[in-house]
Image (tube, rainbow, N blue to C red):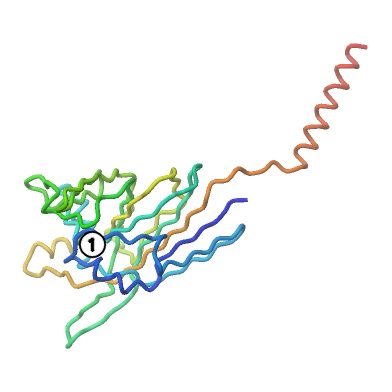
Amino acid sequence: MKKLLTVAAIGLSALAPTQQASAHVAYLDLINNPAATITSTADSTTFYYGQAGLINGNFGFADAADGDWGNSHHAGWAKFDITNPDGAYINLSVFSDGRNETFDGVPSIVSDFNPGLSLYTGVVPDESHEDYSSVPVGKGGAWNALGNTFMANEYGEEGTITYLTHVAQNQSNLQSSVALNNYWLAAGTYSVVFGGDSLAALAASTTSNDDITPRGYGISLKITDVAAVPVPAAIWMMMGGLMGLLGLQKRKMAA
């Protein structure tokens, strides 16, 4: 029977500052962090949803997917490992946590997050930043939501994450969540990079109406290990019976 492992980020408000637009790349480790909740059973699984952090603006993914790349500061960065040498299937979801908050009458967190996500193999170095990543002239940033992304930090560490797939919004019907389900991965380390996918918000971000008010988000991950399915005993009994019949038939023909 397949082993089910569910990993979700719960109540990570303490990590929120590292996920805002003012920070360099700082990964949320979906599995190896004190706030993660893990449930593993032989035949059932439970999802746990909750606050994971804040993202400034609702356009980071749309900006990174428009052909001239986007600023990594408008993205959330998460990572996880597949440890089963035979690989595993994942269910991955990024969603709005629904928070609306104000401070002195001004919105401080808005609930209209419409996420898009990209999945990559590998990780970039912690504290990576556009200033050190040799961003080509004419590009809006280092993050390529639809292709490989190279980034580096001030310590001279550099790395490239290799694009696998993405999930985007239907612009005619924006949703508060996106999901990548039943996607097989080999053993290794993976990056999930996500941000707002509203083209309207992207258009506004290039004008004086730029809206980078934080959006609260959550992220969840389920990993289902690949396991060999045992052949039921009845199959072996049937095969044994068939072999016996074949042997009997051969003896009759020889007689």
Horizontal side of 200 relative to 41 (left or right) equals left
Q: Position of residue 145 (x, y in %)?
A: 25, 50
Residue count near mark 1 (Cα–Cα under 10 Å), binned few <14, some 14–19, many ≥20: many
- Identify whether 245 is placed above or below 95: above
Residue type, label 1:
Ser
The image quarter containing residue 17 is: bottom left
Q: Position of residue 108 (x, y in %)?
A: 21, 79
Please report the residue visible at 16 percent of the width from the left and 48 percent of the height from the top: 156
Helix, strand or loop at disc 1? loop
Q: Relative to 53, is 189 above or below?
A: above
Q: Is residue 177 left or right of residue 110?
A: right
Q: Residue at x 10, y 70 (%)?
A: 209
User: Which residue, as the protein is rendered here, is positioned at the far right?
Assistant: 255
- Residue 25, position in %: x, y? 22, 58
| Residue hosting label 1 | 198
The answer to which quarter of the image holds residue 92 is bottom left
